[in-house]
Amino acid sequence: MRLKKYFGQHLLVAPGVLESIVKYIDPKEGEILVEIGPGTGNLTKRILSYPFKELHLLEIDPDMVEELKNSIKDERVFIHQADATSFDFCTLGDKLKVFGNLPYNVGSLIVENTVFHHRCIPQAIYMLQKEVAEKIQKGPSWLSTFVRSFYKVEYLMSLPGRFFFPKPKVSSALIRLFRKQNPSDLDLRDYKEFLTALYSMKRKALKNKICEELLIKLSIDPMLRVEALEPEKVLLLYKLEDFLGG
Ligand code: SAH
Protein backbone atom coordinates (compact mmCIF):
# COMPACT_ATOMS: atom_id res chain seq x y z
CA MET A 1 0.00 0.00 0.00
CA ARG A 2 1.18 3.54 -0.80
CA LEU A 3 1.59 5.49 2.42
CA LYS A 4 0.13 9.00 2.59
CA LYS A 5 2.22 11.76 4.06
CA TYR A 6 -0.76 14.06 4.61
CA PHE A 7 -2.29 11.48 6.94
CA GLY A 8 0.96 11.28 8.92
CA GLN A 9 1.42 7.62 8.04
CA HIS A 10 4.60 6.37 9.69
CA LEU A 11 4.11 2.74 10.62
CA LEU A 12 5.71 1.20 13.66
CA VAL A 13 7.67 -1.77 12.41
CA ALA A 14 9.95 -2.89 15.26
CA PRO A 15 8.48 -6.01 16.95
CA GLY A 16 10.26 -5.36 20.26
CA VAL A 17 8.89 -1.83 20.46
CA LEU A 18 5.38 -2.94 19.54
CA GLU A 19 5.56 -5.56 22.29
CA SER A 20 6.57 -3.01 24.95
CA ILE A 21 3.75 -0.69 23.90
CA VAL A 22 1.27 -3.55 24.27
CA LYS A 23 2.64 -4.16 27.79
CA TYR A 24 1.93 -0.54 28.68
CA ILE A 25 -1.56 -0.79 27.21
CA ASP A 26 -2.07 -3.97 29.23
CA PRO A 27 -5.51 -5.00 27.87
CA LYS A 28 -7.75 -6.64 30.44
CA GLU A 29 -10.89 -8.67 30.55
CA GLY A 30 -14.04 -6.54 30.26
CA GLU A 31 -12.25 -3.42 28.97
CA ILE A 32 -13.43 -1.32 26.06
CA LEU A 33 -10.35 -0.29 24.10
CA VAL A 34 -10.08 2.36 21.41
CA GLU A 35 -7.16 2.56 18.99
CA ILE A 36 -6.56 5.77 17.07
CA GLY A 37 -4.90 5.51 13.66
CA PRO A 38 -4.41 1.71 13.48
CA GLY A 39 -3.04 2.01 9.93
CA THR A 40 -2.23 -1.46 8.63
CA GLY A 41 -2.85 -2.91 12.10
CA ASN A 42 0.70 -3.59 13.30
CA LEU A 43 -0.17 -2.75 16.88
CA THR A 44 -3.80 -3.90 16.61
CA LYS A 45 -2.90 -7.49 15.71
CA ARG A 46 -0.75 -7.84 18.82
CA ILE A 47 -3.61 -6.69 21.01
CA LEU A 48 -5.90 -9.43 19.67
CA SER A 49 -4.25 -12.22 21.64
CA TYR A 50 -5.26 -10.53 24.91
CA PRO A 51 -8.62 -10.62 26.70
CA PHE A 52 -10.85 -7.51 26.38
CA LYS A 53 -14.50 -6.80 25.68
CA GLU A 54 -14.39 -4.54 22.63
CA LEU A 55 -11.74 -2.88 20.49
CA HIS A 56 -12.83 0.11 18.43
CA LEU A 57 -10.52 1.23 15.63
CA LEU A 58 -10.73 4.87 14.50
CA GLU A 59 -9.02 5.31 11.13
CA ILE A 60 -9.49 8.27 8.77
CA ASP A 61 -8.04 6.75 5.59
CA PRO A 62 -10.63 4.70 3.63
CA ASP A 63 -7.86 2.58 2.04
CA MET A 64 -6.55 1.60 5.47
CA VAL A 65 -10.10 0.88 6.63
CA GLU A 66 -10.54 -1.48 3.68
CA GLU A 67 -7.28 -3.25 4.47
CA LEU A 68 -8.21 -3.60 8.15
CA LYS A 69 -11.60 -5.06 7.24
CA ASN A 70 -9.91 -7.65 5.06
CA SER A 71 -7.20 -8.62 7.50
CA ILE A 72 -8.86 -8.53 10.93
CA LYS A 73 -11.49 -11.13 11.65
CA ASP A 74 -12.37 -10.88 15.31
CA GLU A 75 -15.89 -10.30 16.51
CA ARG A 76 -14.71 -8.05 19.36
CA VAL A 77 -13.32 -5.54 16.85
CA PHE A 78 -15.33 -2.63 15.39
CA ILE A 79 -13.86 -0.55 12.58
CA HIS A 80 -14.91 3.08 12.23
CA GLN A 81 -13.86 5.38 9.44
CA ALA A 82 -13.58 8.48 11.60
CA ASP A 83 -11.56 11.59 12.36
CA ALA A 84 -10.12 11.30 15.87
CA THR A 85 -9.69 15.08 16.20
CA SER A 86 -13.47 15.48 16.43
CA PHE A 87 -14.80 12.00 17.23
CA ASP A 88 -17.26 11.76 20.13
CA PHE A 89 -15.52 9.08 22.21
CA CYS A 90 -18.31 8.93 24.77
CA THR A 91 -20.58 7.20 22.24
CA LEU A 92 -18.42 4.08 22.75
CA GLY A 93 -18.56 3.73 26.53
CA ASP A 94 -17.85 5.53 29.77
CA LYS A 95 -14.57 3.89 30.87
CA LEU A 96 -12.46 3.77 27.74
CA LYS A 97 -8.78 2.92 27.45
CA VAL A 98 -7.61 4.84 24.38
CA PHE A 99 -4.25 4.33 22.66
CA GLY A 100 -2.43 4.84 19.40
CA ASN A 101 0.66 5.74 17.47
CA LEU A 102 -0.82 9.11 16.58
CA PRO A 103 -0.38 10.92 13.27
CA TYR A 104 2.15 13.68 14.09
CA ASN A 105 0.41 16.45 12.18
CA VAL A 106 -2.71 16.27 14.32
CA GLY A 107 -1.30 14.76 17.54
CA SER A 108 -2.03 17.85 19.65
CA LEU A 109 -5.58 18.08 18.31
CA ILE A 110 -6.23 14.46 19.25
CA VAL A 111 -4.88 15.07 22.75
CA GLU A 112 -7.15 18.13 23.00
CA ASN A 113 -10.16 16.06 21.89
CA THR A 114 -9.24 13.46 24.53
CA VAL A 115 -9.45 16.11 27.25
CA PHE A 116 -12.84 17.22 25.95
CA HIS A 117 -13.98 13.63 26.52
CA HIS A 118 -12.10 12.97 29.76
CA ARG A 119 -15.32 12.04 31.52
CA CYS A 120 -15.31 8.74 29.59
CA ILE A 121 -11.51 8.30 29.20
CA PRO A 122 -9.76 7.41 32.47
CA GLN A 123 -6.59 6.43 30.62
CA ALA A 124 -4.87 7.12 27.29
CA ILE A 125 -1.50 5.94 25.93
CA TYR A 126 -0.19 7.92 22.99
CA MET A 127 2.86 7.95 20.77
CA LEU A 128 3.56 11.55 19.78
CA GLN A 129 6.33 13.63 18.31
CA LYS A 130 8.87 13.88 21.13
CA GLU A 131 8.84 17.69 21.40
CA VAL A 132 5.04 17.68 21.58
CA ALA A 133 5.05 14.97 24.26
CA GLU A 134 7.62 16.88 26.35
CA LYS A 135 5.74 20.14 26.03
CA ILE A 136 2.51 18.49 27.14
CA GLN A 137 4.26 16.98 30.13
CA LYS A 138 6.11 20.11 31.23
CA GLY A 139 4.42 23.15 29.70
CA PRO A 140 4.13 26.05 29.65
CA SER A 141 1.30 26.08 27.15
CA TRP A 142 -2.46 26.29 27.30
CA LEU A 143 -2.71 22.67 26.05
CA SER A 144 -0.33 21.36 28.71
CA THR A 145 -2.38 23.01 31.45
CA PHE A 146 -5.62 21.83 29.84
CA VAL A 147 -4.31 18.24 29.90
CA ARG A 148 -2.74 18.43 33.36
CA SER A 149 -5.85 19.93 34.93
CA PHE A 150 -7.45 16.51 34.54
CA TYR A 151 -4.66 14.01 33.88
CA LYS A 152 -1.35 13.04 35.38
CA VAL A 153 1.10 12.81 32.47
CA GLU A 154 3.62 9.98 32.61
CA TYR A 155 6.55 9.88 30.17
CA LEU A 156 7.04 6.20 29.24
CA MET A 157 9.78 6.09 26.61
CA SER A 158 11.46 7.86 23.71
CA LEU A 159 11.91 6.28 20.30
CA PRO A 160 14.22 7.33 17.47
CA GLY A 161 12.82 7.58 13.94
CA ARG A 162 14.43 4.34 12.78
CA PHE A 163 11.69 2.24 14.40
CA PHE A 164 9.17 3.66 11.92
CA PHE A 165 8.55 3.28 8.21
CA PRO A 166 8.92 5.59 6.43
CA LYS A 167 11.43 7.04 8.87
CA PRO A 168 10.20 10.41 10.18
CA LYS A 169 12.59 13.34 10.63
CA VAL A 170 11.60 13.66 14.27
CA SER A 171 11.87 11.40 17.32
CA SER A 172 8.82 10.08 19.12
CA ALA A 173 7.78 9.52 22.69
CA LEU A 174 5.17 7.40 24.40
CA ILE A 175 3.15 9.04 27.15
CA ARG A 176 0.33 7.94 29.40
CA LEU A 177 -2.50 10.19 30.56
CA PHE A 178 -3.93 9.00 33.85
CA ARG A 179 -7.09 10.76 34.98
CA LYS A 180 -6.52 12.44 38.34
CA GLN A 181 -9.91 12.74 39.87
CA ASN A 182 -13.46 12.01 39.06
CA PRO A 183 -14.49 13.64 35.81
CA SER A 184 -15.15 17.33 36.04
CA ASP A 185 -18.43 18.90 34.97
CA LEU A 186 -16.75 22.18 34.00
CA ASP A 187 -17.73 23.86 30.75
CA LEU A 188 -14.61 22.71 28.90
CA ARG A 189 -15.07 25.05 25.91
CA ASP A 190 -15.18 27.99 28.27
CA TYR A 191 -12.16 26.71 30.23
CA LYS A 192 -10.22 26.33 26.97
CA GLU A 193 -11.04 29.94 26.06
CA PHE A 194 -9.86 31.09 29.49
CA LEU A 195 -6.59 29.17 29.05
CA THR A 196 -5.84 30.33 25.51
CA ALA A 197 -6.35 33.96 26.65
CA LEU A 198 -4.23 33.41 29.76
CA TYR A 199 -1.33 31.89 27.80
CA SER A 200 -1.59 34.20 24.79
CA MET A 201 0.78 36.82 26.25
CA LYS A 202 3.00 34.64 28.38
CA ARG A 203 5.34 37.47 29.32
CA LYS A 204 2.74 39.70 30.86
CA ALA A 205 2.31 39.66 34.61
CA LEU A 206 -0.75 37.82 35.90
CA LYS A 207 -2.29 41.01 37.26
CA ASN A 208 -2.82 42.18 33.67
CA LYS A 209 -5.11 39.25 33.03
CA ILE A 210 -6.70 38.33 36.31
CA CYS A 211 -8.27 40.45 39.02
CA GLU A 212 -5.43 41.40 41.41
CA GLU A 213 -7.61 40.98 44.47
CA LEU A 214 -8.31 37.38 43.59
CA LEU A 215 -4.60 36.67 43.10
CA ILE A 216 -3.75 38.13 46.49
CA LYS A 217 -6.56 36.20 48.12
CA LEU A 218 -5.02 32.99 46.77
CA SER A 219 -1.50 34.09 47.85
CA ILE A 220 -0.34 34.31 44.25
CA ASP A 221 2.15 37.09 43.53
CA PRO A 222 0.36 39.32 40.95
CA MET A 223 3.70 40.07 39.28
CA LEU A 224 4.31 36.42 38.37
CA ARG A 225 3.95 35.19 34.81
CA VAL A 226 1.46 32.49 33.96
CA GLU A 227 4.22 29.92 33.39
CA ALA A 228 5.04 30.02 37.12
CA LEU A 229 1.63 28.55 38.03
CA GLU A 230 0.90 24.88 38.60
CA PRO A 231 -2.11 23.59 36.60
CA GLU A 232 -4.06 23.06 39.85
CA LYS A 233 -3.71 26.77 40.66
CA VAL A 234 -4.82 27.76 37.17
CA LEU A 235 -7.89 25.57 37.46
CA LEU A 236 -8.68 27.07 40.86
CA LEU A 237 -8.31 30.59 39.44
CA TYR A 238 -10.69 29.72 36.65
CA LYS A 239 -13.29 28.32 39.02
CA LEU A 240 -13.11 31.26 41.41
CA GLU A 241 -13.07 33.89 38.70
CA ASP A 242 -16.16 32.29 37.29
CA PHE A 243 -17.70 32.19 40.72
CA LEU A 244 -17.02 35.91 41.22
CA GLY A 245 -18.46 36.63 37.80
CA GLY A 246 -15.00 37.65 36.56
N1 SAH B 1 -0.74 2.56 14.28
C1 SAH B 1 -0.08 2.31 13.03
C2 SAH B 1 -0.09 3.53 12.08
C3 SAH B 1 0.34 4.85 12.67
S1 SAH B 1 0.43 6.10 11.45
C4 SAH B 1 1.33 1.83 13.30
O1 SAH B 1 1.85 2.13 14.36
O2 SAH B 1 1.92 1.17 12.45
C5 SAH B 1 -0.97 7.10 11.84
C6 SAH B 1 -2.30 6.56 11.37
O3 SAH B 1 -3.32 7.51 11.71
C7 SAH B 1 -2.43 6.38 9.86
O4 SAH B 1 -3.01 5.13 9.59
C8 SAH B 1 -3.36 7.51 9.40
O5 SAH B 1 -4.13 7.21 8.27
C9 SAH B 1 -4.23 7.70 10.64
N2 SAH B 1 -4.83 9.03 10.77
C10 SAH B 1 -4.35 10.22 10.31
N3 SAH B 1 -5.14 11.24 10.69
C11 SAH B 1 -6.16 10.69 11.42
C12 SAH B 1 -7.31 11.23 12.08
N4 SAH B 1 -7.55 12.54 12.10
N5 SAH B 1 -8.16 10.36 12.71
C13 SAH B 1 -7.91 9.01 12.70
N6 SAH B 1 -6.84 8.46 12.11
C14 SAH B 1 -5.97 9.28 11.47
Image (tube, helix red, strand yellow):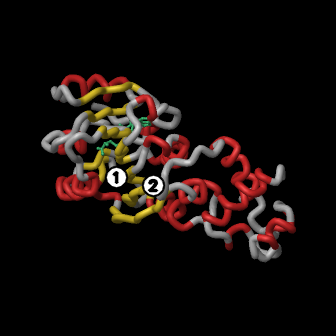
Q: Secondary structure at mark 1?
A: loop
Q: Residues within 10 Å of mark 2 (few under 14, many from 20)?
A: many
Q: Where is ligand 1, by quadrant? A: top left
**Is 77 situated left or right of 152 in this image?**
left
Mark 1 and mark 2 residues within 8 Å of each other at the beta carbon? no
How many labels were placed on the picture?
A: 2
Instruction: Kindly identify which numbered label has been placed on residue 179.
Output: 2
Q: Position of residue 191 (x, y in %)?
A: 68, 48
Instruction: Kindly identify which numbered label has been placed on residue 167.
Output: 1
Q: Residue at x 66, y 47 (%)?
A: 192
Q: Position of residue 3 (x, y in %)?
A: 34, 36
Amino acid type, callout 1: Lys
Q: Residue at x 34, y 52 (%)?
A: 167
Q: Position of residue 240 (x, y in %)?
A: 75, 57
The quarter holding residue 14 reads: bottom left
Q: Position of residue 172 (x, y in %)?
A: 39, 58
Amino acid type, callout 2: Arg
Q: Residue at x 22, y 58 (%)?
A: 20
Distance, label 1 to label 2, CA atoms, is 32 Å
Q: Nearer the viewer, mark 1 or mark 2?
A: 2
**Is 187 situated left or right of 241 in this image?**
left
Q: Residue at x 65, y 58 (%)?
A: 235
